[in-house]
Image (tube, rainbow, N blue to C red):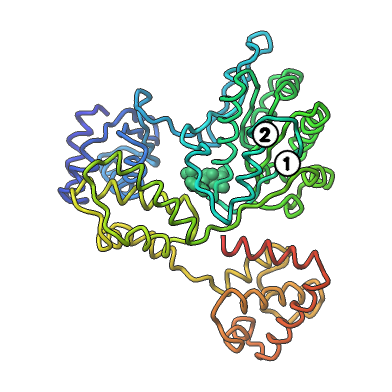
């Protein structure tokens, strides 16, 4: 299909999306390629592509298929001459491992790492109570002095700034010591490259490259849990670097001890350094982040006014994570500048209705039961069933305790959701867990993890 043909077809979309949307979002995109079930479109910015993808994909697919094209998937991309370079997605295929002979010394261009996001610096990182320790530790490592703790292990829920801090460390180290070989990549990429090296019989090169860096950063290490040979290789790489006193920085969505299917010896090595967590954001931190980003946007969209109270409102209402918070602000500014209006509370409520609704979502007892069952490897049906075996009854009590703690439900209501149990049974369960928590550190670790996962 040519772009002209697409041009005709896309006019059909006016009926489906309306004139305004059509002019704003559909007209500017260009069909770049139609290959089998995949249609690729050029968009001016990543935000633009996200928006079109989220809001108009179904309509576009419908029209393409109505015109006899069996398209199943749409992709939106910013042409490479575009100004913004976005972080590479974890799933992008790896570039082939460079042969040793092709490697240049003292430059990380040849390292098989992921590219760094230029926006993730210490300057742009807002520090608050929930992340001050992690930030301080990252700063220390970024000084590049003698290695004092190895590894630095950063953990916390999604969107709390782990990747941002790691990139910031890398930027800082490169700025201070350009000759330093800093390698940053996700655990997924590590695995990908390892598998590739095995396949291409380049495992010696692989080992050599990873052992030749000065600083190794592996993001989202929980990914390699359960992947045995990758874990094994990771363990050896890790040890080799620690032996040479090279700094290692690791991130994960939970503490080392909490990562299931990770070998014990790896867990204990990961715990040897400094383990710090990023706590869920609090109101002040969210407001601080919003103010900083708003300042940035004010420069991008001069003349756009933001009414008092809007940032405050967002900081109160969007409590999930920073990524969502940022997304909301991006959308708000883009929208306001498109329609040429001041950003008011009303506009925010309108434009962000879906995000606000999702943030309001309350945790349900059923979700708690599901998570707990998953954590303890029991069936969901056993949560509400009659079995009294300890390995079933204890998780059930954990779920009762969490239901009491994390939801506003009364004991009789909780009882009903646990297969019609009496409220005294629930009370007993809650008490039992409270007692055990004081002495059983495994149990209290479990509870902390579950709480974090549920409130994430
Ligand atoms: P994680 O890796 O923990 O899932 P990211 O580091 O990717 O989270 O952060 C998600 C988004 O939120 C990024 O755009 C990041 O810049 C931003 N962010 C998170 N924490 C902060 C912070 N304290 N200050 C400024 N931006 C932040
Ligand atoms: Mg991350």
Q: Position of residue 387 (x, y in %)?
A: 76, 79
To which quarter of the image does residue 303 belong? top left
Please tell me in which quarter of the rendered image ligand 2 is found: top right
* Residue 202 x %, y %: 72, 18
Q: Which labelled disc corresponds to residue 425?
A: none
Of residue 273 and residue 412, the one placed in the foreground of this image is 273
Q: Vertically, is 176 above or below 351?
A: above
Q: Which x, y percent locates residue 317? A: 41, 64
198 or 51, which is in the foreground? 51
Q: Viewed as shown, does residue 65 lie left or right of 107?
A: left
Picture quadrant where residue 315 is located: bottom left
Identify the residue at image location x=80%, y=64%: 442
Q: Ligand 2 near label 1 (Cβ, under 8 Å)? A: no
Secondary-structure class at tag 2: helix
Residue farthest top in this picture: 101
Find out whether the residues at labels 2 and 1 contact each other: C-beta distance under 8 Å: yes
| Residue 171 at x, y percent in the picture | 55, 30
Name the residue rendered at 53%, 57% in the picture.
Answer: 281
Q: Give the residue at x 38% y 37%.
A: 75
Q: How many marks?
A: 2
- Dot placed on the residue nearer the N-terminal end, 2 or 1: 2
**Assess mark 2: CB under 8 A from ligand 2?**
no
Q: Is residue 230 left or right of residue 59?
A: right
Above or below residue 397? Residue 18 is above
> The N terminus appears in which quarter of the rendering?
top left
**Toward the viewer: 430 or 106?**
106
Q: CA distance from mark 2 to mark 1?
A: 9 Å
> Could you tell me which residue is drawn at 71 percent across and 20 percent down?
209
Task: Give the labeled residue for mark 2.
Answer: 191
Q: Which mark is residue 227?
A: 1
> Is disc 1 surrounded by few (<14), some (14 to 19) or many (20+) residues within 10 Å?
few
């Amino acid at each position: 299909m040519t772009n002209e043909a697409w041009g005709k077809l896309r006019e059909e979309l006016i009926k489906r999306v309306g004139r305004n949307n059509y002019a704003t979002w559909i007209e500017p995109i260009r069909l770049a390629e139609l290959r089998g079930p995949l249609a690729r479109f050029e968009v001016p910015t990543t935000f633009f592509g996200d928006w079109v993808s989220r809001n108009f994909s179904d309509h576009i697919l419908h029209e393409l298929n109505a015109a006899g094209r069996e398209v199943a998937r749409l992709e939106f991309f910013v042409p490479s001459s575009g100004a913004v370079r976005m972080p590479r997605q974890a799933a992008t295929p790896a570039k082939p491992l460079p042969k040793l002979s092709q490697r240049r010394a003292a430059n990380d261009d040849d390292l098989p790492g992921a590219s760094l996001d230029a926006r993730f610096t210490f300057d742009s990182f807002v520090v608050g109570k929930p992340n001050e320790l992690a930030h301080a530790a990252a700063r220390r490592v970024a000084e590049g002095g003698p290695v004092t703790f190895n590894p630095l292990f950063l953990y916390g829920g999604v969107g709390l700034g782990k990747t941002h801090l790691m990139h910031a460390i890398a930027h800082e180290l490169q700025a201070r010591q350009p000759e330093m070989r800093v390698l940053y990549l996700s655990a997924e990429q590590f695995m990908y490259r390892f598998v590739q090296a095995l396949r291409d019989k380049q495992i010696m090169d692989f080992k050599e490259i990873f052992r030749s860096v000065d600083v190794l950063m592996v993001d989202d290490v929980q990914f390699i849990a359960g992947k045995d040979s990758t874990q094994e290789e990771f363990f050896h790489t890790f040890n080799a670097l620690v032996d040479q006193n090279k700094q290692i920085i690791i991130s994960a969505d939970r503490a080392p001890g909490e990562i299931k299917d990770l070998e014990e010896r790896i867990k204990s090595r990961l715990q040897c350094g400094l383990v710090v967590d990023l706590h869920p954001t609090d109101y002040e931190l969210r407001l601080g982040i919003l103010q900083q980003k708003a300042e940035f946007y004010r420069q991008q969209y001069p003349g756009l006014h933001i009414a008092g109270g809007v940032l405050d409102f967002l900081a109160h209402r969007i409590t999930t994570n920073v990524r969502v918070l940022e997304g909301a602000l991006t959308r708000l500014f883009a929208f306001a500048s498109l329609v040429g209006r001041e950003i008011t509370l009303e506009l925010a409520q309108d434009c962000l209705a879906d995000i606000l609704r999702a943030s309001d979502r309350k945790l349900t007892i059923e979700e708690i039961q599901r998570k707990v069952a998953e954590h303890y490897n029991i069936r969901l049906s056993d949560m509400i069933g009659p079995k009294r075996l300890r390995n079933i009854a204890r998780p059930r009590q954990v779920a009762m305790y969490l239901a009491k703690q994390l939801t506003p439900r009364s004991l009789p209501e909780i009882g009903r959701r646990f297969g019609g149990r009496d409220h005294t049974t629930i009370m007993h369960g809650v008490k039992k867990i409270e007692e055990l928590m004081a002495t059983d550190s495994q149990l209290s670790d479990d509870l902390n993890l579950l709480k974090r996962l549920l409130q994430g």
